[in-house]
Image (tube, rainbow, N blue to C red):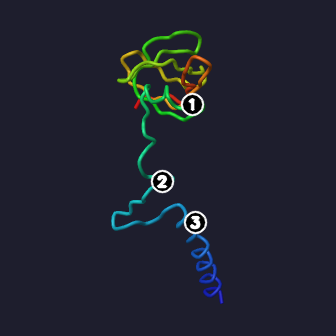
Amino acid sequence: MKKHILALLLTTAAITAAPALAQNGGFNGPAGTTTSQQQGGFNGPDVATTTVEQAKSMRDDSWVVLEGNLVRKVGDELYEFRDRSGTINVEIDDKDWRGLTVNPQDKVRLEGEVDKDWNSVEIDVKRITKP
C-alpha cells in the first residue's frame, strides 16, 4: 500500500513539474544547453530615412527619420542639423537625450515630426540615437 501511495505521489509531482519545466526551458539536446526565448516583433525593413531637402517640403506633423550631424546649438533645445542635402533646425527636448552625448563629428539618427510655421520649418525630435 505504501509503495502505491509513494508511486502516486511521485507521478503527481512529475506531472505537476512538467509544465513548469516547459515554460522555463529545459533539456535541449545532448549537451543539456537551453535556448533563450527572445521577445517577438517585426523582422523586416526599417523606416526609410528622409533627407533634409525632402523634410522641408513635407506636410506639417509628417513623421521623418534623418541621419546626419548636429552642427551647433542655436538656442535652448534648438540645434542645427546637417545631412548631405542641406541644413535644418531641430528641437530636442532635454528629456529626449536620455543620457546620450554627441559632438559635431558623431553621426546621429533623429526621429520626429515636421513642424511648419508661417515662414519656417523645423523638426520636433522625439528620439535621438547613434546608428
> Which quadrant, please, contains the N terminus?
bottom right
Rendering coords of residue 2 (x, y %): 65, 86
Count every numbered label the image shows and give the total. Answer: 3
Q: Do callouts 2 and 1 mark residues in contact (Cβ within 8 Å)? A: no
The answer to whether 25 is drawn above or below residue 120 in the figure is below
Whole-number angstrom distance, CA of label 3 to CA of label 2: 18 Å
Q: State the SS at label 1.
A: strand
Q: Which mark is residue 113?
A: 1
Viewer-proximal residue among 59 and 61: 59
> Which quadrant, please, contains the C terminus?
top left
Q: What amino acid does circle 2 point to?
A: Gln
Q: State the SS at label 3.
A: helix
Q: Residue at x 59, y 24 (%)?
A: 116
Q: What amino acid does circle 3 point to?
A: Ala
> Which residue was labeled with disc 3?
20
Sooner in the amino-acid sequence: mark 2 or mark 1: 2
Viewer-proximal residue among 124 and 21: 124
Rendering coords of residue 84 (x, y %): 35, 23
Rendering coords of residue 102 (x, y %): 44, 19
The answer to whether 64 is drawn above or below residue 121 in the figure is below
> Which residue was labeled with disc 2?
38
Left/right of residue 41 with respect to residue 45 in the rendered view? right
Q: Do callouts 1 and 3 mark residues in contact (Cβ within 8 Å)? A: no
Q: Residues within 10 Å of mark 1 (few under 14, many from 20)?
A: many
Sooner in the amino-acid sequence: mark 3 or mark 2: 3
Which is more foreground, mark 3 or mark 2?
A: 2
Q: Name the image quarter holding residue 19.
A: bottom right
Q: Residues within 10 Å of mark 3 (few under 14, many from 20)?
A: few
Q: What amino acid does circle 1 point to?
A: Glu
